[in-house]
Amino acid sequence: MGAVHFDTYVPRESVIHHWSPRLKLISLLALMFACATVQHITLVPWMLGLVALLYGLSGLPLSFLQQRLSYPGLFILAVVVLLPLTVGDTVLWQWGWLALRQEGLQATLLILGRFLAILTLGFILLGTTPFLTLLEAMRSLGLPTILADMSLLTYRYLHEIGAMLVTMQQAMRLRGFGQRRQHWLKVNGRTMLHLAMLTGNLLIRSYERSERIYKALRLRGYGYGPKSAQEESVSPQVSVLSWGLTGGALACAAALIVAEAVLRGALSQASLLGWGLMGVLLAVVIGLIIAEGVLRR
Amino acid sequence: MIDSVSTRFDSLKMAQGKRPVAIVTQSLSFSYPDQSDVLCNISLTLHESERVGLIGHNGCGKTTLFMLLCGVLTPSAGTISLFGEPVQPGQFRPEVGLLFQDPDDQLFSVSVWDDIAFGPQNMGLSAEEVVVRVAQAAEMTGVTHLLQRMPHHLSGGEKQMVAIAGLLAMTPKILLYDEPTASLDLRTRRRLIRFLQHSTETLLIASHDLEFVLEVCDRVLLIDNGGIMADGDPRQVMGNQDLMERHGLEKPHSLMPHLGIDSHSHESGG
Amino acid sequence: MHIPDGILPAQVCVAGYAMTGLATWYSLRQINRKPDPTAEIPKASLLTAAFFVASSIYIPVPPASVHLILNGLLGVVLGYFAFPAILIGLFFQALVIGHGGLTTLGVNAAMMGVPALLAYHIFQARHSFSKVVMEPARTALFAFLGGALGLGIAALIFLTLVILNISADINANTERGLILVLSAAHIPLMMVEGVFTAMLVLFLQRVKPELLES
């Protein structure tokens, strides 16, 4: 799997690191969604400025961000290149048959701005919160037990299974796999069959490992009934700082959304209705999940 | 049974004491990104048909050395050549075979026959030649009766022998064995010892099983701190208690004087 | 194949989360109906890890390569666990590969997860055809359909969402045209995914049949 940067957590002493995980999660997610609502290019600098401020507060090194942005940046590259050349009618610059169009450029800048902001917020969250803490925060917010348990186990064994695949691929290559000359644009049936068998073996070995793991877990009491009341541990006191940060973050999120709505012109009845419905639907779903989680306990 | 599928053994050169050189490394060094100097300045020479044991504590770099010799890893410094040809990382060199510690990493086909045929097929041999190669390799390792079975349903020892057959079918000149006795029961281990004592390829065996190394190898390399700490006759190197303990190992029981008669002497390989 | 952050407006992201919430609730309900749900958690978790790892396997088609989505296969092997598996897999992708995708997690999970559940049902439907088609062709055929449709439907949703939302200035006809053309371009990919799924399922059936949900 090449370089697997697992546990993206970077330990530092910063206000963001000390921000209560539950509140941090909710606030940063709210901010991310607020960024996703931005459709006006004038809001992009504000959005990016806010994110830069938060990143500065987090104490995370710039290299962390640079390293992590490089891969997803490739994704967006196609968009960045194509849109300004194809979309819109107002031509800004012309080189022969290539025309740089204003609408396309605007769309690209919007997408890039939102992309950068949302991704950076995500990295702030992941860089300042260890995975297990994050999972615990989600669990306390109502994440169903099955999802929490699965996430833990998957996390625990991901690296091992990755190493298994790497070794198996090496063994195949050492016996000559992938040596045959391939014709262009043709899929080699034998190669596909061997890759299918490789994947199949990976699945079988993982499955067999899981049977042993399950037995070991059972011997330590897993799955015999509801977890004891000890699970509901006393949550540490949430500091004033955390509440302050949360308040600030949510206020900024709200400000972005309201600014966007205002710039779009008076809120029409239809869009209000649309938002209202979305809100109700989301509330219902979250309510169901939390109810499920509470009832499980 | 033995010499049907094997190396060009130049008996004249052997008799003259000048054996062709199989593996040469010059100032070989390797570091992982998070671990520097796993191997540091390793220079060694192995001659054809030598049987060399590689001993050292866990993490001393034995597997890394194997990976470098096969071209799976690229050295940070230094050169490696096999039979005079420098090793290019990523190049397919069927003259070298590596037996992985866990046979499950190596076996993956639906039948034992298919698995042994995998290597020869990738070498581009004709279908008839592949059939011959598989039959010979199976016979040499004693797994002919397992050819139609599924590798997943075999015992640890059987899987090991099938994996070895898979390598032999490519007629390698050099075989690297990574902890071959790790998961074997005593009977299969004894079979493996006998098998290795009769093989004619150049062998490099990394193992914690020091008694095994004593019985099979005619030369031993002790690795520690990324370098070769000792190189010589197995009895002398492993019999040096001080040396062994200094590098995290123990002197094998059979070399301890109070045990009296060395019962393995007549079985030791060349 | 996942939609990155920044392209979809917030309403779509929220709708995606709503759909995912619904599908998760439904899947968990089905899972809890089983005789011993906790027994299956280790299996599902390790297989989630295995699928995640396996997504790095690619089929070389010079000069490029085809990465497999395998959501159809996930459905066939994991049944209702496929949806949580995809959800968790995508979450880990955000962590490990650093794709981002936390706002579009809902959309992506629904996009890949719902076809996975569909593939599961398609594969299970093979039992109703035992008189019409013989084994092993029957398993191969239904596995192929599950794999191909798993990818096909996900790709269709992906293209529709991206093309409709990428810019307000593309007219409707161009959008429709683009979706059609790009969808057609996915047909060979569907074939590859279908064949691969069929090969894998046949392999599993021979070597470890209990892995296939029944």
Image (cartoon, rainbow, N blue to C red):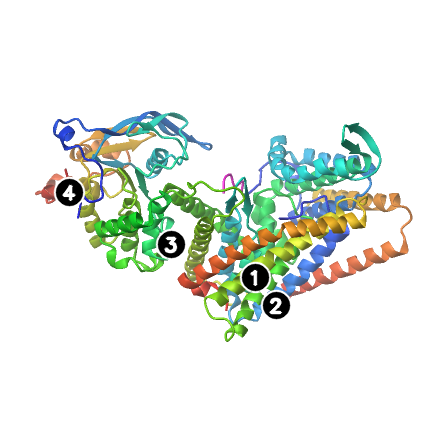
- Location of residue A89 in the rendering, given as x and y in whole percent from the top left corner: 84, 38
- Disc 4 is attached to a residue of which chain? B
- Location of residue C146 in the rendering, given as x and y in whole percent from the top left corner: 56, 61
Q: Which region of the structure is painted magenta?
A: A1-6
The earlier-in-sequence mark between 3 and 4 is 3
Which dot, 2 or 4, sits closer to the camera? 2
Cα–Cα gap, marks 4 and 1: 61 Å
Residue C146 marker: 1
Q: Is residue A5 magenta?
A: yes
Residue B254 marker: 4
| Amino acid type assigned to the residue bearing label 3 in the image | Ser
Cα–Cα gap, marks 3 and 2: 38 Å
Q: Which residue is mark 3?
A: B109
Residues packed near mark 1 inside 10 Å, few (<14), some (14 to 19) or many (20 plus):
many
Q: Which residue is mark 2?
A: C29
Cα–Cα gap, marks 2 and 4: 63 Å
Report the magenta stretch's main SS. Answer: loop
Q: Are marks 3 and 4 on the same chain?
A: yes
Q: Secondary structure at mark 3?
A: loop
